[in-house]
């Protein structure tokens, strides 16, 4: 029934957000989620030594011809040193 209420793009984004959090956890990070949904990053990852990574999670999307749509950080995200974490359709994650 959820599909009747939620746009497929939002469903994909929500699901991939959870995939990304799970992936970061498996990489050994403590993950702090942005619960407001506002702001330049989605999560903050903290490692055992106290290093933090600010991350914006993006789903990899393709055009009708199959080419990948390139995602880049905004100017504000670049100034704040926010990284993109790309989630593929097969749930593969890449931190860039």
Image (tube, grey):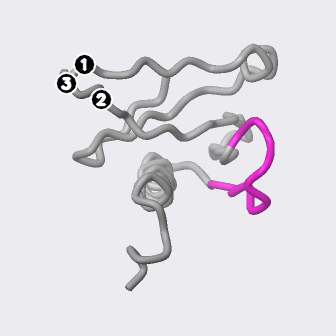
Name the residue tied to disc 1: 67
Secondary structure type for disc 2? loop
Crowd rating for badge 2 (residues with CA inside 10 Å; few <14, some 14–19, many 20+): few
Crowd rating for badge 1 (residues with CA inside 10 Å; few <14, some 14–19, many 20+): few
Judge whether residue 18 is colored magenta.
Answer: no
- Per the model, the C-alpha gap separating discs 2 and 1 is 5 Å
Q: Which residues are magenta?
A: 31-41
Name the residue tied to disc 2: 62
Upstream in sequence: badge 2 or badge 1: 2
Secondary structure type for disc 3? loop
**Quarter residue 70 falls in:** top left
**Quarter residue 32 falls in:** bottom right
Residue 56, position in %: x, y? 62, 37
Name the residue tied to disc 3: 66
Say whether marks 3 and 1 touch (CB < 8 Å): yes
Q: Which mark is residue 10?
A: none
Q: Residue at x 38, y 85 (%)?
A: 1
Q: Residue at x 25, y 19 (%)?
A: 67
Vertically, is 40 above or below 22? Answer: above
Judge whether residue 33 is colored magenta.
Answer: yes
Vertically, is 61 above or below 28? Answer: above
Vertically, is 17 above or below 61? Answer: below
Vertically, is 16 above or below 53? Answer: below
- Per the model, the C-alpha gap separating discs 3 and 1 is 4 Å
Residue 79, position in %: x, y? 80, 15
Say whether marks 2 and 1 touch (CB < 8 Å): yes
Would residue 78 be found to the left or right of residue 8 on screen? right
Say whether marks 3 and 2 touch (CB < 8 Å): yes
Q: Residue at x 27, y 44 (%)?
A: 89
Residue 18, position in %: x, y? 47, 60
**Quarter residue 35 falls in:** bottom right
């Amino acid at each position: 029934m959820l599909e009747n209420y939620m746009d497929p793009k939002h469903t994909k984004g929500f699901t991939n957000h959870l995939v990304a959090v799970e992936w970061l956890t498996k990489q050994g990070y403590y993950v702090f989620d942005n619960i407001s949904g506002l702001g330049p990053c989605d999560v903050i990852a903290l490692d055992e030594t106290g290093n933090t990574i600010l991350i914006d999670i993006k789903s990899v999307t393709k055009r009708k011809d199959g080419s990948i749509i390139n995602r880049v950080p905004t100017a504000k995200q670049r100034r704040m040193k926010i990284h993109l974490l790309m989630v593929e359709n097969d749930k593969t994650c890449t931190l860039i």
